[in-house]
């Protein structure tokens, strides 16, 4: 189940370049996965981490890793992120409030989310991450 959810989350067509996208500094660091909600299903991912370093994005859980590149940018005044992996590109939105990073991504072929929600039937994934203490 976990592998399917992750693969489903990371498989979306590549984004087209847009000159109106303004790159922003990524929320670099190591983040603990506090909560993940996929299509309305809440999952506790104890021990899961996300490391963001420059454009590098590494999700580690249960001894495995998914690596990719993350492009954090602002478009039409809203923070957005495209996360590229071997499976494709995930389009999402993000917000940083203190030490809490929220990322909401769409499923393959779906439009980029506009709200930080993952209700049943939405095929969206909502990640709640907390910055790890150094």
Image: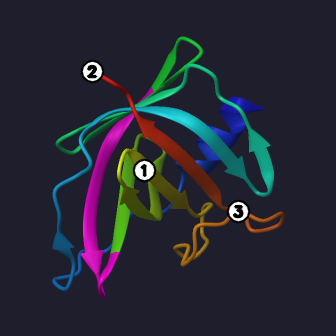
**At 33% from the left edge and 24% from the top edge, which residue is drawn?**
133
Pointers 3 and 1 in contact (C-beta within 8 Å): no
Q: Secondary structure at mark 3?
A: loop
For label 2, the SS is: loop
Q: Image point 58% across, 67% down: which residue? A: 116
Find the distance from the CA under tag 2 to the CA under tag 1.
16 Å
Residue wearing tag 2: 134
Residue 95's quadrant in the figure? bottom left
Q: Does the magenta portion include 71?
A: yes
Which residue range is magenta in the image?
66-78
Based on the displayed image, in which of its 4 quarters is residue 110 positioned?
A: bottom right
Q: How is the image coloured?
A: rainbow
Q: Which label lies toward us, 2 or 1?
A: 2
Total marks drawn?
3
Above or below 20: residue 97:
above
Give the CA distance from mark 3 to mark 1. Answer: 16 Å
Mark 3 is surrounded, within 10 Å at the Cα level, by few (under 14), some (14 to 19) or many (20 or more) other residues, namely many
Of residue 36 and residue 68, the one placed in the foreground of this image is 36
Compare marks 3 and 1 and give the one earlier in the sequence: 1
Name the residue beneath numbered marker 1.
Answer: 101
Instruction: Point out which mark residue 35 bears.
Output: none
Q: Quadrant of the C terminus?
A: top left
Residue matched to label 3: 118
């Amino acid at each position: 189940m976990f592998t399917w959810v992750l693969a489903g989350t990371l498989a979306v067509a590549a984004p087209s370049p847009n000159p109106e996208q303004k790159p922003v500094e990524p929320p670099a660091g190591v983040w603990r996965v506090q909560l993940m909600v996929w299509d309305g299903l809440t999952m506790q991912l104890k021990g899961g981490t996300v490391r963001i370093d420059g454009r590098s994005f590494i999700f580690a859980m249960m001894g495995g890793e998914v690596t990719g590149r993350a492009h954090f940018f602002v478009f039409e005044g809203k923070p957005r992120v495209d996360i590229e992996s071997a499976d494709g590109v995930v389009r999402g939105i993000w917000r940083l409030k203190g030490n809490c990073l929220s990322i909401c991504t769409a499923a393959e072929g779906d439009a980029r989310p506009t709200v930080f929600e993952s209700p049943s039937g939405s095929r969206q994934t909502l990640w709640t991450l907390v910055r790890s203490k150094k």
